[in-house]
Amino acid sequence: GDSVTQMEGPVTLSEEAFLTINCTYTATGYPSLFWYVQYPGEGLQLLLKATKADDKGSNKGFEATYRKETTSFHLEKGSVQVSDSAVYFCALSQNNAGNNRKLIWGLGTSLAVNP
Amino acid sequence: DAGITQSPRYKITETGRQVTLMCHQTWSHSYMFWYRQDLGHGLRLIYYSAAADITDKGEVPDGYVVSRSKTENFPLTLESATRSQTSVYFCASSSGQPQHFGDGTRLSIL
C-alpha cells in the first residue's frame, strides 16, 4: 500500500541555519503531496502542497519540489527562525474518487530552533 | 466564528467510563476525520465520514464509535475507556484537500 517515510527527529538548528527535512513516498499513480506543520499546543495546518511532478510548493519561506523520479518531497528553508520550531508532517493523497480524501501520513519530524 | 472546534480541550476520566469528544465545523465540509496522535506513531486515522449518515473505519477503530447525524458535527465516543486510549485526539474536515484541523482534545485515562 501507499506509505510516507520522513527523516527521524528531533532536528535542532541554530537560528538562520539551512533546513532540510527529507520525505520519500511509495504510491501508485500520481498522488498529491503535502507538508503540514503543527505548532505547540495546536492542530495541524497546511504548509504547502504540490499536485503533480516537478511542481514546487512554497509558503512562509519553505519550499518543496515534487520529484517523481526519486519519489521525494523534501522540505527546505534557507534561514530558519525560532518561530519555525514545530513538528512537520509529510503526507500524500491519491487523486481518485475512491480515496475518500484520506491522507497517508509520515510520522512527523520535530524541529527545534535555538536563538 | 468559522472554523472547526473541538471540546473539551482536556479531559481526565477513569477506565471503564464512557466519554464523548465533540467536533463541530462551520464550513459545511462533507468529509470529517478523527485521528489520534501518539509519540512514535504520528497520526492514526480512527474513523472518517464522507457525508451525514456515512461513516467508515480507519486504521485503529476498535473501542471507538462515531455518528454523524448532521453535516457539521462528528462526535467520537469511547464506549468503555482503557488506558491505551490516553492520547491527543484531533478532528479534521475537508471538502477535498487540504484537511482543516481542530486544536485537539488531550484525553487522559487513569
Image (cartoon, helix red, strand yellow):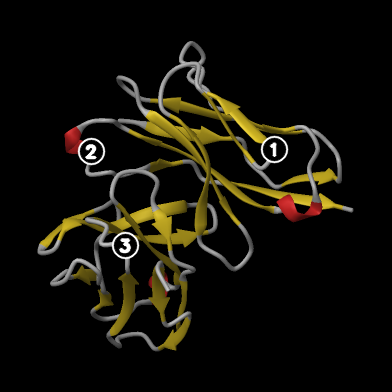
The residue carrying mark 1 is: A61
Residue, x 22% and y 31% (percent of image)?
Answer: A96
Task: Tell me the element at label 1.
Answer: loop
Residue B110: x and y in percent read: 45, 85
Task: Tell me the element at label 3.
Answer: loop
Is residue B52 toward the left or the right of residue A58 in the image? left
First along the sequence among labels 1 and 2: 1
Residue B78: x and y in percent read: 28, 76
Which numbered tag is attached to residue A90? none
Give the residue type at disc 2.
Answer: Asn
Outermost residue, right side? A115
Give the residue type at disc 1.
Answer: Gly
Q: Are marks 3 and 1 in contact (CB under 8 Å)?
A: no
- The subunit letter for the residue under badge 2 reads A
Residue B20: x and y in percent read: 30, 81
Graded by Cα atoms within 10 Å as few (under 14), some (14 to 19) or many (20 or more), the crowding at tag 1 reads few
Q: Is residue A90 above or below residue B100?
A: above
The residue carrying mark 2 is: A99
- The subunit letter for the residue under badge 3 reads B
Graded by Cα atoms within 10 Å as few (under 14), some (14 to 19) or many (20 or more), the crowding at tag 3 reads some
Residue A33: x and y in percent read: 44, 32
The residue carrying mark 3 is: B27
Q: Are marks 2 and 3 in contact (CB under 8 Å)?
A: no
Residue A69 visible from this viewpoint: yes
Residue A74 visible from this viewpoint: no
Give the residue type at disc 3.
Answer: Trp
- The subunit letter for the residue under badge 1 reads A
Is residue B72 toward the left or the right of residue B103 in the image? left
B14 and B27: which one is in front?
B27
